[in-house]
């Protein structure tokens, strides 16, 4: 073989190896058979069907990094690799994969176990009425179901199909039905074979790139077996039983206050039976959590150094993409933390409504 | 010729000096852990380092996570970079080829010697780390409280642990073979071994840097170092094969392309040294 022939052989081999991974992506996506109404129903129903797969979420929202909200900050501001086994809403396992180990949550009915490899610790807690977001809330079918609450066929338009996770997926663009929402639109694609939402992109007003993305890289509709859904701690595992899951659950159970019935014109949701209020639904929703002095102080300090923050004696507020975060009160005070997908005006109004309208429990009972 | 190359490699004091230096870091870490009993905070430090405080049998994996990103590839790049360019620099390449030996055979012999260096180095890391881990950190988990715990919190028997550890070290060897192929190719081009090794290390640094850039996301699947730490996935339950398989394919592609390029370069090269 000549010198040229040898180098040509190497060049051909290199080209084939570079092109090979792209072949799957170049396969054409089929045209969607289902209409928007049917796709909406399919996307909503996915959360009640079994599936499993690998998912990746990516957020660009640099939330204030306060200790008690550390996981939430990472979830919305970083890339997160997940493995999910989902039987139904009450039986699932979501592994958050890290280079140094993993943190898993396993729900079995009313009990949730959180396993941390690096701590060698399994924490059992009851499933609370209200809590902070966790990885399981952000996998495509679960996030889709939440975002589509209150959305009707008139709020959606069809997008071109794409190939995702090895199958053709029909696209939908969702415009929030509420004018109070800070979300401009949500784009989602539903697999035509799996009937599962495979990609969800959330766009803020005026943003060309999504503020938050959740996608499956591979997915199966086989029901997960007991072998992956049952968690039995090993003899060397430190087992803990927690009365509270996180700061929202703790405040909801023990804070001696009740939020007002409405905030910024949005009604208190049915899940709000304690101190924490959840107002609105779907793309226009805000949570209001009462915080004690020391928790509010630490968060206020972190918010004060967040780019774009506005602070006065009444509140500290910052908007990050579609997510608004507002803490009522000033230094040395406790306060109400409000976080959600409301416009700045609506969030400010909700803050005023909650901070002036809440009551102490003794006043009600 | 292969036997001659292997003998030269194993008798070279620099080979064993390099292996000793690679083992120094994990050994120092084990000593510090044993003295202070302080593990890394969650989310920081190499994989498995937090777990070795209670189970020293896992220390080979922690050692692998420590040396795989930097120490091991540098050593492999230096050794593979020496293969052809070293002979050329010493002026012995012409004499080697005067013998009735084809250039392809010489290249294969050099490749086998580099592979042997990779295998011996990785095995020595595993053995030294196991001995140091058990001696300094103990094997309480296996002998006192039951089986080892997998990354997913499920029990892992000793045979399972040994099998998965063997797979992890085999995977690390394959990853280093990718580096060796690149350095061997550069060794056929460069006039000095240092030039070839520096070229390979430049590729490693560039790969590591590009992996941190979102703007380079389209290149990520092709980067040499992209899946190196995927061996951790072998200790999840169930085992997560996706990244390990992708890692094997990427390393295989580098080996095929760069060994092919080394062959094309060396067999048509004008030998003047």
Image (tube, grey):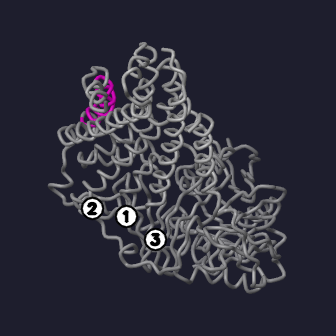
Answer with left or right where residue A118 lies relative to residue B181: left
Magenta-drawn segment: B17-34
**Residue at image point 53% right, 50% down:** A67
Placement of A156 over or under A301, stated as above or below = below
Which chain hosts label 3?
A: A
Mark closer to the chain start, 1 or 2 = 2
**Callout 1 secondary element:** loop
Front in this rendered view, residue B234 or B49: B234
Answer with left or right where residue B142 lies relative to residue B93: left
| Residue annotated with mark 2 | B156
- Residue B26 magenta-drawn? yes
Q: In the rendering, at what x and y percent does residue A210 appear?
A: 74, 58
| Residue annotated with mark 3 | A93
**Callout 3 secondary element:** strand
Placement of A363 over or under B75, stated as above or below = below
Do the dots labelled 3 and 1 sit on one chain? no
Q: In the rendering, at what x and y percent does residue A189 appear?
A: 70, 72
Query: Which quadrant holds residue B61?
Result: top left
Name the disc covering residue B237, or none: 1
CB contact under 8 Å: marks 1 and 2: yes
Placement of B149 over or under A170, stated as above or below = above
Residue B11 visible in rendering: yes
- Residue B73 magenta-drawn? no
């Amino acid at each position: 073989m000549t010198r040229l022939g040898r180098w040509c052989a190497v060049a051909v081999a290199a080209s084939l190896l570079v092109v090979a991974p792209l072949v799957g992506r170049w396969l054409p996506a089929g045209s969607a058979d289902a209409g928007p109404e049917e796709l909406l129903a399919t996307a909503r129903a996915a959360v009640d069907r079994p599936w499993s797969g690998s998912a990746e979420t990516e957020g660009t929202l640099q939330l204030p990094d306060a200790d008690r909200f550390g996981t939430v900050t990472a979830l919305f501001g970083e890339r997160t690799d997940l493995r999910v086994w989902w039987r139904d809403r009450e039986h699932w396992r979501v592994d958050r994969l890290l280079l140094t180990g993993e943190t898993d949550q396993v729900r079995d009915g009313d009990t949730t176990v959180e396993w941390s490899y690096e701590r060698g610790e399994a924490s059992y807690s009851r499933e609370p009425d209200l809590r902070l977001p966790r990885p399981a809330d952000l996998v495509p079918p679960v996030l889709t179901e939440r975002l589509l609450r209150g959305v009707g066929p008139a709020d959606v338009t069809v997008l071109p199909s794409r190939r995702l996770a090895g199958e053709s997926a029909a696209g939908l663009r969702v415009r929030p039905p509420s004018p109070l929402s800070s979300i401009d639109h949500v784009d989602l694609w539903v697999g035509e074979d799996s009937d599962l939402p495979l990609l969800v992109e959330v766009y803020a007003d005026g943003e060309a790139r999504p503020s938050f993305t959740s996608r499956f890289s591979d997915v199966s509709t086989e029901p997960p077996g007991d072998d992956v859904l049952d968690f039995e701690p090993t003899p060397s595992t430190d087992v803990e039983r927690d009365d509270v899951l996180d700061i929202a659950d703790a405040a909801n159970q023990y804070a001696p206050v009740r939020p007002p019935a409405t905030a910024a014109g949005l009604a208190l949701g049915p899940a709000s039976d304690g101190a924490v209020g959840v107002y609105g639904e779907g793309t226009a929703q805000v949570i209001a959590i009462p915080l004690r002095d020391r928790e509010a102080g630490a968060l206020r300090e972190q918010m004060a150094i967040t780019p774009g923050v506005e602070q006065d004696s009444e509140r500290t507020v910052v908007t990050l993409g579609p997510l608004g975060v507002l803490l009522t009160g000033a230094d040395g005070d406790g306060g109400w933390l409000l976080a959600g997908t409301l416009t700045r005006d609506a969030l400010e109004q909700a803050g005023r409504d909650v901070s002036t309208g809440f009551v102490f429990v003794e006043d009600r009972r | 010729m292969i036997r001659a190359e292997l003998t030269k490699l194993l008798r070279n004091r620099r080979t064993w000096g390099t292996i000793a230096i690679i083992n120094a870091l994990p050994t120092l870490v084990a000593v510090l852990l044993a003295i202070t009993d302080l593990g890394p905070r969650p989310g920081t430090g190499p994989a498995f380092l937090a777990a070795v405080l209670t189970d020293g049998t896992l220390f080979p994996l922690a050692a692998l996570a420590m040396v795989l990103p930097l120490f091991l590839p540098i050593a492999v790049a230096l050794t593979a970079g020496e293969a052809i360019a070293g002979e050329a620099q010493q002026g012995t390449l012409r004499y080697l080829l005067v013998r009735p030996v084809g250039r392809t055979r010489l290249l294969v012999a050099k490749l086998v010697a580099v592979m042997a260096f990779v295998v011996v180095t990785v095995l020595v890391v595993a053995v030294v780390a196991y001995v140091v881990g058990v001696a300094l950190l103990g094997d309480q988990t296996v002998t006192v409280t039951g089986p080892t715990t997998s990354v997913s919190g499920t029990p892992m028997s000793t045979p399972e642990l040994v099998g998965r550890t063997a797979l992890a070290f085999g995977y690390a060897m394959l990853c280093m073979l990718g580096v060796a192929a690149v350095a061997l190719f550069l060794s056929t081009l460069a006039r000095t071994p240092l030039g070839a090794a520096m070229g390979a290390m430049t590729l490693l640094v560039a790969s590591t840097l590009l992996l941190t850039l979102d703007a380079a996301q389209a290149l990520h699947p092709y980067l040499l170092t992209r899946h190196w730490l995927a061996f951790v996935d072998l200790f999840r339950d169930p085992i997560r094969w996706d990244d390990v398989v992708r890692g094997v394919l990427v390393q295989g592609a580098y080996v095929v392309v760069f060994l092919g390029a080394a062959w094309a370069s060396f067999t048509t090269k004008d030998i003047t040294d």
